[in-house]
Image: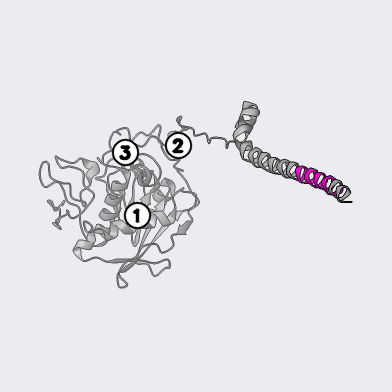
Amino acid sequence: MSEQRRAVDGSRGRVALRRRRKQRVRLGAIGATVCLAALGTAAVPLLLPRLLPDNASRASSPEAVRTTTGPTPDPGTSATRGATSAPPDDSTVAGSPDPSESPKAPKSPSATGTSGSGKGSSSTPTIPATGPGTFDTAPVVVTGPASGTPFRVQVEDGAGVDPADAARQIGAILNDQRGWRQAGARFRQVTSAEAELTFKVATASTTDKLCNVRQPEHIGEVNCRAGVNVVINLKRWQLGSPEFDGPATEYRALIVNHEVGHWLGRGHLTCPGPGQPAPAMMQQIDGLKGCVSNAWPYDTQGRYLDGPAVP
């Protein structure tokens, strides 16, 4: 019996041994599968670009943005061609052009560009010669003293100038220490008819009507002060003056300072001497007479830029 038991036990042991071997093989196969799966997943991003064609890999990249660096068309060149006379350097008082402001043979205006540009710009703005005669009032964008003289800024509809931008520029001129602020003048912007001074940026045709321009050589060229209105010719606002040695932005300061000077009761001055700044109240269109162009009534040290009075 003992031999039979040993035979049975041996047979059972072999069966158990085979089972254990099969289990080890099965576990090894499972482990190998898991390892291969992990390796394959990690390797896909590395192997995929090599397996795919070049066009497929490039298709997944974002397209570069193209920029054009070539010259752009000049939309407003025709606006200044064919001019036969240069504009007056400054404007007129009480709506009647000053006969002494006779336009001269023009230089080629180089102070071009959109609102705010000066000499050296590569493009000329489109400047309409006529407009509807209606105006858009700028919103309040200028901070100033609460007790200052109320002023407002208006731009003729269709002029192509942003009223708010024009108001910021005019406000900056009025508040500049080189301007009439140095003489004690204070201004605050409003939008209503309470304004005691109104700056109107108008087309040449509308300017001629508001300024009562009669003389042929002044038509389309002048600015003026007509009562409480300072009328700024759109052409002069955008291009400056060929007689003024400076950018259009500086010439705007001359227009504002000269006309506000008249509003404050100042008369015309002339050149005090060769090489000195031309007074802001000088009619610089008549020639600088040895002076240099200047847009401000005061210098940076607060000294008034005076000159002999014009009879």
From the viewer's perspective, is residue 31 above or below residue 50? below
Determine contact: label 1, label 2, CB under 8 Å.
no
Q: Which residue is mark 3?
A: 119
Q: How is the image coloured?
A: one colour
Q: Residues within 10 Å of mark 1 (few under 14, many from 20)?
A: some
Q: Which residue is mark 2?
A: 76
Q: Looking at the image, which residue is at 47% across and 45% down?
A: 130
Query: What amino acid does circle 1 point to?
Result: Gln
Q: Earlier in the sequence, mark 3 or mark 2?
A: 2
Q: Looking at the image, which residue is at 31% across and 38% down?
A: 119
Query: What amino acid does circle 2 point to?
Result: Gly
Q: Main secondary structure of the magenta part?
A: helix
- Left or right: residue 106 versus residue 79 is left
- Left or right: residue 300 versus residue 249 is left
Observer-side mark, 3 or 2, equals 3
Q: CA distance from mark 3 to mark 2?
A: 16 Å
The foreground one among 246 and 214 is 246
From the viewer's perspective, is residue 73 above or below residue 37? above
Image location (x, y in percent) of residue 296? 22, 52
Image location (x, y in percent) of residue 150? 34, 68
Determine contact: label 3, label 1, CB under 8 Å.
no
From the viewer's perspective, is residue 118 above or below residue 184? above
Query: What amino acid does circle 3 point to?
Result: Lys
Rendered image: mark on residue 169: 1
Please state the extent of the stretch shown in magenta in the rendering: 8-23
Within the image, what quadrant is residue 137 found in? bottom left
Observer-side mark, 1 or 2, equals 1
Image location (x, y in percent) of residue 181? 23, 62
Does the magenta segment cover residue 280? no
Q: Secondary structure at mark 3?
A: loop
Q: Earlier in the sequence, mark 1 or mark 2?
A: 2
Q: CA distance from mark 1 to mark 2?
A: 23 Å
